Amino acid sequence: MSDPVLVLNCGSSSIKFALFDAGTSPLPRAPLWLGKVDGITGAAPTFTESGAAPAPLTLDGAQPYHAALDHIRARVVARLGTRRLAAVAHRVVHGGSKYFEPVRVDAAVLADLKSYIPLAPLHQPFALDAIETLLDAQPGLAQVACFDTAFHHTLPEVEQMLPLSWAAWERGLRRYGFHGLSYAFMSVVLAERYGDAARGRTIVAHLGSGASLCAMQDLKSVATTMGFSALDGLMMGSRCGALDPGAVIYLMEIEKLSLAQVGHLLYHESGLLGLSGVSADPRELLRVEDGNHQVQAALALYVRRIVREIGALAAVLGGLDMLVFTAGIGEHNAIIRRRICDGLAFLGVTLDAQANASGAALVSGAASRVKVAVEPTNEEWIAAQGALAVLSAAAG
């Protein structure tokens, strides 16, 4: 397995990639090379790779997504030289109630995964499109799907169930949970850094454009805020989070929005973007919040929803020993971390202001009853590890 593993993370308007050296054991956390194509469906797509500034990229207007994938493939081939890929690992958001471990994708598995598109319409189709394209172009190349839902396979039944009919439960309508590759990495790195202190009552806050919380005991998922879909739970950049279903009925019955219009509203025009009317990015909102009540209200609700859900998960855990912030906002936005922790003073959370401002690994104050940590996530490394595990199992 001296050949590298390529990891692809395909979104609706971007494709991120990372190349890992599979010839080194243990697998290095840092990739050999990484980058992304951004703005695929926009007017000015760009290509970025390690050590270089974003460069303009011209994509075929008829099939820009395929053109972006072709560009990455060409760059990978040039990078590899005489070497070949051992496998391509794909972040696939939904594995349904069938796939709990990384799996090599063939035509039958691909058909299964396509049936889950309605459960994750914002993410699932793009990963599967990339898999199908590569299957057609290089059928002998191992492609491994690594699932964001898999980490939450340990959720107890009471956390998986939706308060619908028993027949709905039997049809697979349940809470699956997401951001599992990120939480899987947290379960590894927190054990390494904090040992037994991380094995107690821990909540990890994955705060990016999408956002969720995961309550862990013994570093296993026991509760999470995202449920049946990636719309549930926390307020996000452009997604609504948990919403009274009566509001959806009202939008369709009284305001006469179509199913497609409601879906677009909830996924793309809600959350911070919808409420602020300015941006889905807290950094931009913090810069303009002074004197802007709409922006202030959006940020206040964003923080309030996170505080409320952390309180709810702490109740499920029976208390809280450690709170961990990760992903783009969680890792880099000290102001949002401070506002959240201010709302958690009742749990005994206090921050070290200097450590928080500098982005230290441990930001809790000396008197804090809860350890508060900031930990970069590494979903790509988890996916690469998953691909290597599948290849090792196949080799016997």
Image (cartoon, rainbow, N blue to C red):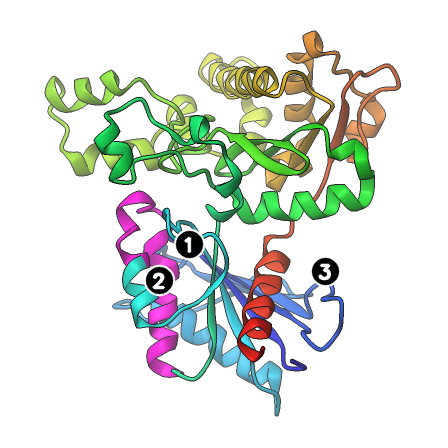
Q: Amino acid at mark 2?
A: Leu
Tell me: 190 left or right of 253. right
Question: Residue at left 53%, top 15%?
Answer: 308
State the CA–CA distance, disc 3 to disc 2. 26 Å
Task: Give the left or right position of residue 54, taking residue 12 as reference.
Answer: right
Q: Which mark is residue 128?
A: 2
Labelled disc at residue 348: none
SS under mark 3: loop
Residue 324, located in which quarter of the rendered image?
Answer: top right
Q: Quadrant of the N terminus?
A: bottom right
State whether residue 272 appears in this view.
no
Q: Nearer the viewer, residue 271 or 105?
A: 105
| Residue 60 location, quadrant | bottom left
Q: Position of residue 393 (x, y in %)?
A: 56, 71
CA gap between label 3 and label 1 equals 25 Å
Q: Nearer the viewer, mark 3 or mark 1?
A: 1
Residue located beneath label 1 in the image: 99
Q: Quadrant of the C terminus?
A: bottom right
Dot placed on the residue nearer the N-terminal end, 2 or 1: 1
Image x and y of residue 313, in percent:
56, 21
Say what amino acid the circle numbered 1 marks.
Tyr
Q: Residue at x 73, y 46 (%)?
A: 189
Tell me which numbered mark, 3 or 1, is placed earlier along the sequence. Answer: 3
Q: Is residue 301 visible?
A: yes
Q: Residue at x 67, y 43 (%)?
A: 186
Q: Circle 2: is it few (<14), some (14-19), or many (20+) Cα within 10 Å?
A: many
For badge 3, the amino acid type reads Arg
Residue span colored magenta: 113-138
Q: Per the image, is 336 magenta?
A: no
- Residue under numbered circle 3: 29
